[in-house]
């Protein structure tokens, strides 16, 4: 009597397939567990209710622009003068321009600052850059994230603050304009804040 060993072999998964699958699952769970929500590909929050009577005129203009752009979800090229590039800093630049508080690119003089590093450079040159721990951010301030994270540099704008938490709105977050809660005191990716023009 002969035993068919071929059919038994076909039913078993090779060890390398099992190991590779396990590694992929562990990495995926690790990324989802450790990554700040601003890097994940789904919306996490609705735009918050913000009491405009507690804001300065400039803060109120910024919040209303952010609300409108969050609802419209325009493409990144709209904020970048038609240029197809990473657009989080372009989005911040556009919001500030439309709120009548335009930024000024330290290299070109343009209202548009397309890079996060240059955006930080602008705030430093203006004396409006504040570091975490030395400053409590306010509505309208710009959050600047470093490039040591796997997702690179990033920036977004604060629309509400409660203790060590801030609600932010940012462009180019998984290709969209999204709202998130940021624990700014404990998020190691936060470099600092660009203060809203007073």
Image: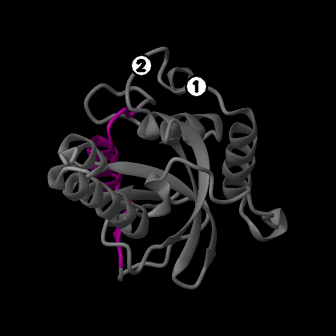
Given contact means CB atoms under 8 Å apart, are the residues at marks 2 and 1 in contact?
Answer: no
Q: Residue at x 30, y 25 (%)?
A: 108
- Residue 165 horizontal side relative to residue 45, left or right: left
Quarter placement of the C terminus: bottom right
At label 2, counting other C-alpha atoms closer than 10 Å, the crowd grade (few under 14, some 14-19, many 20 or more) is: few
Under circle 1, the secondary element is loop
Q: Position of residue 71 (x, y in %)?
A: 75, 39
44 horizontally vs 46: left or right:
left
Q: Residue at x 81, y 62 (%)?
A: 52
Judge by depth and name the residue closer to the eye, 11 or 158: 11
Which residue is depicted at the point 30% across and 72% down? 188
- In the image, residue 12 above or below residue 4: below
| Residue 33 versus residue 135 in the image, above or below | above
Which residue is the site of mark 1?
A: 75
Inspect the magenta stretch and tell me whether residue 130 lies in it. Answer: yes
Q: Is residue 42 visible?
A: yes
Looking at marks 2 and 1 on the same chain, the residue that comes earlier in the sequence is marked by 1
Q: What residue range appears in magenta? A: 113-132
Residue beneath label 2, please?
84
Q: Looking at this rendering, what residue extends furthest in the top direction?
A: 82
Looking at the image, which residue is at 53% across and 41% down?
171
Judged from the image, the secondary structure of the residue bearing numbered disc 2 is: loop
User: x%, y% of residue 85?
Assistant: 38, 25
- Note whether 188 is above or below 31 in the view shown: below
How many numbered callouts? 2
Measure the C-alpha gap from mark 2 to mark 1. 9 Å
């Amino acid at each position: 009597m002969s035993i068919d060993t071929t059919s038994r072999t076909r039913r078993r998964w090779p060890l390398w397939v099992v190991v590779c699958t396990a590694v992929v699952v562990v990495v995926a769970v690790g990324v989802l567990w450790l990554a700040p929500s601003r890097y994940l590909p789904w919306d996490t929050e609705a735009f918050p209710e913000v009491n405009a009577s507690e804001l300065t005129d400039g803060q109120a203009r910024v919040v209303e622009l952010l609300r409108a752009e969050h609802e419209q979800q325009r493409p990144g090229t709209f904020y970048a003068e038609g240029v197809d590039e990473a657009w989080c800093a372009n989005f911040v630049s556009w919001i500030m321009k439309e709120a009548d508080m335009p930024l000024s690119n330290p290299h070109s003089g343009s209202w548009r600052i397309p890079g996060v590093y240059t955006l930080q450079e602008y705030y430093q040159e203006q004396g409006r850059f504040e570091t975490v721990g030395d400053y409590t951010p306010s509505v309208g301030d710009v959050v600047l994230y470093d490039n040591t994270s796997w997702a690179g540099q990033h920036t977004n704008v604060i629309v509400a603050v409660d203790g060590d938490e801030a609600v932010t709105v940012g462009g180019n977050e998984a290709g969209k304009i999204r709202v998130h809660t940021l624990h700014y005191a404990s998020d190691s990716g936060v470099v600092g804040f660009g203060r809203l023009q007073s």
